[in-house]
Image: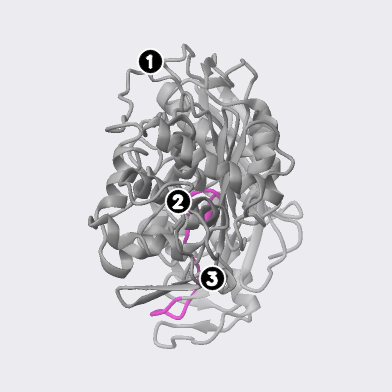
Amino acid sequence: MRSGAKVAIVGGVFAVVAGGVGYGAYNVLTTLNDADDGSGARTTSAEVRTGPVTEAEIDDVSKRFLDAWAKGDATVASQLTTNATEAEPVLAGYRDEAHVSRAVITPGAAVGTKVPYTVKATVSFGGQSKPWSYASELTVVRGQTTGRPLVDWKPVVIHPELTAGASLKTKEASSPSIEAVDHDGKVLTREKYPSLGPILDTLREKYGAKAGGTAGIETVIESAEAGGPDKTLVTLSEGRPGRLRTTLDANAQAAAEIAVKKYNQASVVAIRPSTGAIRAVANNPADGFNAAFLGKQAPGSTMKIVTAATLIEKGLTSANQRIECPPTAMYMGRTFKNLDDFSIPDGTLTTSFARSCNTAFIKLIDDTKDDAALAKEARDVFGIGLDWQTGVATFDGSVPEATGGEAAAQYIGQGTIQMNALNVASITATAKNGTFHQPIIVDPDLDGRPIARAARSLSPSVSQQLTNMMRQTASWGTGKAAMASVGGDRGAKTGSAEVDGQATSNSWFTGFSNDLAAAAVVQSGGHGGDAAGPVVAAVLRAGS
């Protein structure tokens, strides 16, 4: 690309200039059949070139593509890509649907086969105009059948956040903007709390009109999914935002945002056990997939909260009853062991829970005489797998019925069980409160949505035994180090979950302090107390 080359949109007519002098007119129709490698040699359709694209070809085809796009000629520009059928409507929509009236596109120096460029545009719609700037890049490849150099078509060629099936549009907003506030009225923004970005988009889409706002005019990426939230890129006119109160707590949210940044892949959720109110949710990466609510991973030994409840409710053991914890245990042809093959001579259920002994739980499976016991307990008491209506999209956990060795793996949180930080925080909240309160992030009275309810509560005795075992875990067990800085009535459970293809297990940790329960998972974080533990502790300190 020539130094200083710019593509300009002037009054809706696109022209290319370099150093103030226009390029000569390209015979773009000729290039559809014949290719010029920049050296003056032409390649006809009978002479299909092979091998990597050359620097000259990269320079030539990128200029031709940008020139055609700049002139608003979507047909010609699309024919210079690897997928004209998909490219043409997107290129045409840039002017006709995104309503870009002026733009300067400045290419940078090619890096290998990639040509970066920046866009400084003006969007005009409904009597409103606003500047719009961003950067993207294109990649030049050799056509598989023609041998011609072509722009490798992906929607990100037009905008870096544009995905397949989505579209750029400037329009009256599909829903009014919102001013989201926490339970005390403190304003929540994606700039201050990045993890809330996807959640705020969804809340706006669902509750913007109900919050009393009026719609403005925006340039957006319209979701490819029916009913999915738009992503706002440019706001031409604000409209009037509606005020939406959430259950979040600004202090806990701030602590959660900071805590997850210490790890490459981490998420955390905090819930109020007495009500189910979600107090904090954070992810790293932040403004993308909401793993805290939508993730699906084995929760490791944090599942022993549900397992212990199952065994106690069936009368097979109790918190202070002595149970065996050998180094290894076999069940249905599968061998299970404890970390470093430790054992606990003459220990109790509390001891095995606090030190996270796997074999103690495995050895009691036969006595349940019910392959579905764990799945029933998870669903009927802890609400796992019910249709949660939090106010935003969530995965509500899964504990499938299993038999044999697979059932044994489930008892220690492995195998086919799938959870996320929201699910595990809710399990701890249920253990602490005794009754499942479905997590919520906005009041259900706002839209009359139904709230999931578990079939039954824990008995006061079982709830007390579970929370006492968690208190011991936080006091002298595997959660001691992480919970040392947390005050009040506190309890914890650690977990490590092995994942195929990972050298290091995922780190899980859940705990409570007074009327706040939290859970975190750190991918490849190792033992539960090592990575996820400090994340939970930070949120509990801030919110309790």
Image location (x, y in percent) of residue 255: 69, 36
Mark 1 residue type: Asp
Image location (x, y in percent) of residue 189: 63, 28
| Residue at image coords 57%, 19% | 183
Residue 151 sits above or below residue 319 on the image: below
**Residue 445: mark:** 1
Q: Which residues are magenta?
A: 143-163
Closest to the observer, 35 or 118:
118
Q: Is residue 149 magenta?
A: yes
Q: Which residue was labeled with disc 2?
A: 321
Give the CA separation, mark 1 to mark 2: 45 Å
**Residue 502: mark:** 3
Closest to the observer, 484 or 454:
484
**Earlier along the polypeptide chain: callout 3 or callout 2?**
2
Residue 481 sits above or below residue 229 on the image: below
Q: Are marks 1 and 2 in contact (CB under 8 Å)?
A: no
Q: Nearer the viewer, mark 1 or mark 2?
A: 2
Residue 10 visible in the picture: no
Quarter of the view holding residue 369? bottom left
**Earlier along the polypeptide chain: callout 1 or callout 3?**
1
Give the CA separation, mark 3 to mark 2: 37 Å
Dominant secondary-structure state across the stretch colored magenta: loop
Image location (x, y in percent) of residue 515: 57, 27
Is residue 264 left or right of 452 when viewed as pictured? Answer: right
Q: Is residue 401 magenta?
A: no
